[in-house]
Amino acid sequence: MSIHRIGFGFLLPSAIALSLLTPSNYALGQGKADRSQKTAVVCTRDRADRAKEADAKIARQIRISVQKPDRLTHLGSFQVEIEFPQQTNVASQGFGVIVGISENATIENSDDVLVTPRGQSIGYALTTDTLKEMQRASVQFSSQTPDGPKTTWDKSKVRFSVRVWGGDSVRISWVTTGGFTTRGSMSECPAQDLTEIVHSSISVFPEPIEQSISALTCSEEERVLRDLAGHVTVTLSPPSAPRVGQAISVLWSQTEKRFPNSRPTYIVFSLPDDVRFEGQNLIALPKKTRAPASITFEGDHLRAFVPLHSIGSPVQGEFKIKPTKSGYLRGEYAIVTKAKCG
């Protein structure tokens, strides 16, 4: 269902065509924490037990605080804070804290912690593979600093956010590790779990709009979706003297009044074949290609789809249209949704 439709056009004088640019996809690589591999000396059970016993009391004083909101909804977030006590009498090399999060959430604002996907080893000397079945945020407090254990960034307190995408609840588990010892420059006893694993969970509720829209009639739903479409803006900014190969900038935005995830909604741009798209957060499709949610709007033309409903999608963005042929460039865009009744 097209709920908002606009046409546009630009005159492009002849010029030498630039080389064609294809739609770009960008992926951010995630780094790993590596540590030098050294031949370990023998760790005796007595040495390991003494290291664990010495650090366990301090480990229990490390504060892991989950700041639960009164009502957590889909796309909502909460914070986790980890604080090391003011303590300098540490027998081992330091401590680690591992916080596991269920897969229906994402760890954000995590500059102070190492985020490790499910199934992968963390790679820190002061941590273990506990909670490996979950995605994890981990931090280690090294005792090598002169004023007590601190992180690599010289902090005794760190925090990160967790954003929930779906499900009825999000699970959180954590454990404190340590007992890692060295003899000279060689590793001796590996890290151990110093505390029992703590398990917690937070109930997650659907977004209010998801709950309300499911009870509406088709005409009522259409009115709601058209109202949401009215909060979407699109601005096309061509060069002052458009020419072949010069980019036309497209800026789009929506307010915090987002489309419900259960109603796939896109800004769909329809253009001739002799243009190329450049940017992020859009899907470029050749003509007569099946589109997301089987949307047929302008299916006989080259199209670019910008999602407005997807969990985690941005509320604003920019991409570029690059024409490769002189003449009148004609196109249009519309906000198209897959409503309950079509």
Image: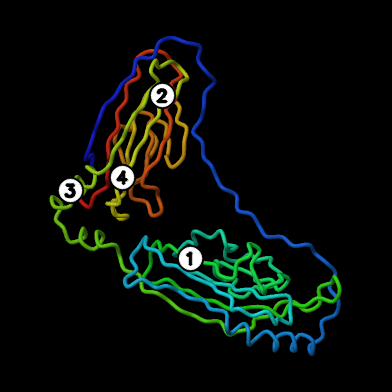
Residue at the spot of label 2:
273
Q: Within 10 angstroms of label 3, few (less than 14), some, or many (20 or more) residues?
A: some
Which amino acid, mark 4? Gln
Crowdedness of circle 1 by 10 Å Cα count: few (<14), some, many (20+)? some
Tell which tag, 2 or 3, sits nearer the viewer: 3
Q: Where's residue 339, x and y in %?
A: 24, 49
The residue to which callout 1 is attached is 103
Tell me the SS state at disc 2.
loop
Q: Taking 188 as reference, is 249 left or right?
A: left
CA gap, disc 2 and disc 4: 28 Å
Q: Nearer the viewer, mark 1 or mark 4?
A: 4
The residue shown at (13%, 52%) is: 220
Between 65 and 317, the one lying in front of the other is 65
Residue 254 got which mark?
A: 4
Dot placed on the residue nearer the N-terminal end, 1 or 4? 1
Tell me if label 1 and label 4 are in contact, CB under 8 Å: no
Viewer-side residue, 13 vs 290? 13
* Side of 116 relative to 256 (left or right): right
> What separation in Å lies between label 1 and label 3 (alpha carbons)?
33 Å
Q: Residue furthest top?
A: 14
Name the residue that disc number 3 marks.
222
Does the CB distance between marks 4 and 3 fall below 8 Å?
no
Q: Tag 1 or tag 2, which sits nearer the N-term? A: 1
Q: Quadrant of the N terminus?
A: top left
* Label 1: element kind: loop
The amino acid pointed to by label 2 is Asp
Residue 327: x, y in percent? Answer: 37, 13
Residue 239 in picture, x, y percent from top left: 40, 21
